[in-house]
Amino acid sequence: MSDKSDKLATRLIGIIIELSMGRKLDVRELSIKYGVSQKTITTDLNKRLKQFLPITKENGVYFLETPL
């Protein structure tokens, strides 16, 4: 795996873990935590993860409708 793929996998797993713990996630905070743009985090949530998880956005934060 390339370094870029490793970073993507690490980021997505981290986001899934946080969501599964019932946390409400802010795109800006995640972008700082993972050192990527807010657009990248939005893409992760809306395109990469939302197709597999019941992610909801409300008042600017993302969360699972029912934690895993």
Image (cartoon, rainbow, N blue to C red):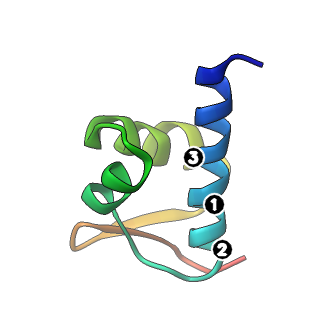
Residue depicted at x 41% and y 37%: 43
Q: Secondary structure at mark 1?
A: helix
Going by the numbered disc 3, the residue's amino acid type is: Arg
Image quadrant assignment for residue 35: top left
Please state which of the two labelled residues, at mark 3 or mark 2, is closer to the viewer.
Answer: 3
Q: CA distance from mark 3 to mark 1?
A: 9 Å
Q: Secondary structure at mark 2?
A: helix
Going by the numbered disc 2, the residue's amino acid type is: Ser
Q: Is residue 67 left or right of residue 62?
A: right
Task: Please give the residue where the numbered disc 1 appears in the rendered image.
Answer: 16
- Along the polypeptide, which appears first: circle 3 or circle 1? 3
Residue 51: x and y, percent? 61, 44
Image quadrant assignment for residue 21: bottom right
Task: Please give the residue where the numbered disc 2 appears in the rendered image.
Answer: 20
Residue 28: x and y, percent? 25, 56
Q: Is residue 23 left or right of residue 7?
A: left
Q: Is residue 26 left or right of residue 17?
A: left
